[in-house]
């Protein structure tokens, strides 16, 4: 697929659309800020000094490239396909989020902004934002759902240690959707000095494409590393999806390699059912508008956004990035769901077989690997994105497995 007009890598269009999805649905107050950000990013994309600063920080601050790891014991245990992990949990701050945060905050500094706001679910985007703000001496405010503040206490403490103000959001279910709502309200109120650092491939244009571009360092590294390790590309890529930034970062550089299968894994919660006790927007939702873009959403017959559910705070969002919606509809990527129970099983297996404590988000991706690997031939190569480490989730997992933390004291 070398023909530009047949490429899957040319979007979005000038209106920020990926087919029927994306766009820019914001108030008049925010439109000048959005247009200013778009202009600054377009300028940065062709500025060698911008990418020199990014590459220096990715290398010497984040610790990139992250390793590509052959999971020998997991491969042997499951039988079938050969399994690799892209180990982005080894980044500084423990997840993929910092890849994107660095880019956005460098842009914010170029725009003269001194106050950074962010939303966070699992807390990893909040930690990454607080970390980079501390490095550059910027004021940082992080909105986090009150429910997530409780279940992600280690990350809340880390953000506060780094100097961020963490504001618990009590509206709705107190999760990621509600945190993003309040962050947008803040941005409208403080337009002069504030930059909104969005953590996923969602929101109004140019955020979905911009976050994707920064996260694409993941897939670019995998292309080089896999050629070095195997002499060819993987047969299948797998990544977990909430909004979908880690997945888009892995998938995007491979979109035009039609021989590579691409699978995104949504949070199936307690099962994809009529009660909506899940966050599988593509599996159980339909198109609508939320947080500045048109995409697949969990909503009722009147278009009211429903409260999703997942044991994983980072996947607990009732929507998905618009580029994922487009890839789903055109059939370039396949999207499946994994339940809490399946993710917990994968979490434990990864710990005991590979000595890696995964976050609950990539545990969903690993659970799907466990489903399909045994049925594939030994020469089939799977690469999944281990996008976060599980320190933040140990209390949630202990509770789910009926362990009393006092037993270990």
Image: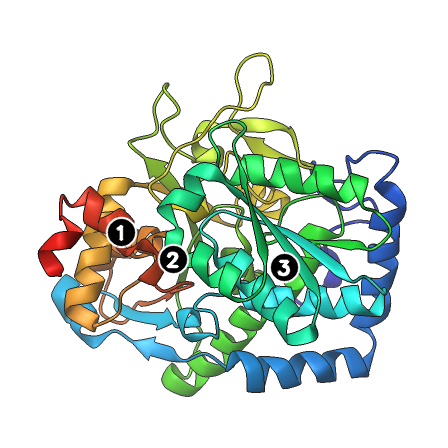
Residue 296 lies, with reference to residue 92, above or below; the image says above
How is the model colour-coded? rainbow
For disc 3, the marked residue is: 212
Gap in Å between the C-alphas at discs 2 and 3?
27 Å
From the viewer's side, name the closer residue of 295 and 188.
188
Circle 2/circle 1 CB separation < 8 Å: yes
**Res. 286 in view:** yes
**Quarter location, residue 114:** bottom right
Residue 403 lies, with reference to residue 292, above or below; the image says below
Residue neighbourhood size for the residue with mark 2, other residues' Cα within 10 Å, grouped as few (<14), some (14–19), many (≥20) = some
Residue in view at x 52 percent, y 77 percent: 221
Residue neighbourhood size for the residue with mark 3, other residues' Cα within 10 Å, grouped as few (<14), some (14–19), many (≥20) = many
Residue in view at x 77 percent, y 78 percent: 50
Mark number for residue 395?
Answer: 1
Gap in Å between the C-alphas at discs 2 and 1?
9 Å
Residue neighbourhood size for the residue with mark 1, other residues' Cα within 10 Å, grouped as few (<14), some (14–19), many (≥20) = some
Circle 2/circle 3 CB separation < 8 Å: no
Q: Earlier in the sequence, mark 3 or mark 1?
A: 3
**Res. 19 in view:** no
Mark number for residue 154?
Answer: 2
Q: How many labels does the image show?
A: 3
Where residue 172 appears, as percent x and y from the top left, is: 51, 27
- Circle 2: element type: helix
Q: In this view, does 156 lie to the left or right of 141?
A: left
Q: In this view, does 402 lie to the left or right of 197?
A: left
Gap in Å between the C-alphas at discs 3 and 1?
31 Å
Where residue 243 appears, as percent x and y from the top left, is: 54, 46
């Amino acid at each position: 697929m070398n023909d530009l007009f047949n490429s899957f890598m040319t979007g979005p269009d000038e209106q920020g659309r990926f087919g029927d999805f994306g766009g820019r649905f914001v108030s008049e107050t925010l439109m000048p800020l959005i247009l200013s950000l778009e202009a600054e990013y377009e300028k940065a994309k062709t500025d060698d000094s911008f990418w020199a600063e990014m590459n220096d920080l990715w290398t010497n601050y984040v610790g990139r490239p992250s390793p590509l790891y052959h999971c020998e014991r997991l491969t042997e245990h499951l039988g079938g396909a050969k399994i690799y992990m892209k180990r982005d949990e080894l980044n500084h701050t423990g997840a993929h989020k910092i890849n994107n945060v660095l880019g956005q905050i460098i842009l914010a500094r170029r725009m003269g902004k001194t106050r950074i706001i962010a939303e966070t679910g699992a807390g990893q985007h909040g930690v990454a934002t607080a970390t980079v703000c501390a490095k550059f001496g910027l004021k940082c405010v992080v909105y986090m759902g009150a429910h997530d503040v409780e279940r992600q206490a280690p990350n809340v403490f880390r953000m506060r240690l780094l100097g961020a103000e963490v504001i618990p959001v009590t509206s709705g279910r107190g999760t990621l959707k509600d945190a993003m709502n309040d962050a947008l309200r803040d941005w409208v109120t403080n337009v002069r000095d504030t930059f909104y650092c969005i953590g996923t491939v969602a929101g109004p244009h140019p955020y979905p494409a911009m976050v994707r571009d920064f996260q694409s360092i993941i897939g670019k590294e995998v292309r080089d590393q896999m050629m070095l390790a195997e002499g060819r590309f993987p047969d299948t890529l797998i990544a977990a999806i909430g909004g979908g930034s880690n997945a888009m970062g892995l998938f995007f550089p491979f979109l035009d390699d039609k021989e590579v299968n691409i699978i995104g894994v949504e949070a199936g919660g307690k099962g994809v059912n009529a009660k909506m006790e899940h966050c599988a927007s593509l599996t159980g939702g339909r198109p609508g508008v939320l947080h500045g873009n048109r995409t697949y959403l969990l909503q009722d017959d009147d278009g009211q956004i429903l409260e999703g559910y997942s044991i994983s705070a980072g996947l607990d969002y009732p929507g998905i990035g618009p580029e994922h919606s487009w890839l789903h509809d055109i059939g370039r990527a396949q999207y499946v769901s994994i339940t809490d129970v399946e993710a917990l099983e994968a979490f434990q297996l990864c710990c005991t077989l590979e000595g890696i404590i995964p976050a609950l988000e990539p545990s969903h991706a690993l659970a799907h690997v466990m489903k399909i690997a045994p049925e594939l031939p030994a020469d089939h190569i799977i690469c999944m994105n281990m996008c976060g480490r599980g320190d933040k989730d140990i209390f949630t997992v202990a509770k789910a497995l009926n362990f009393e933390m006092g037993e270990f004291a």
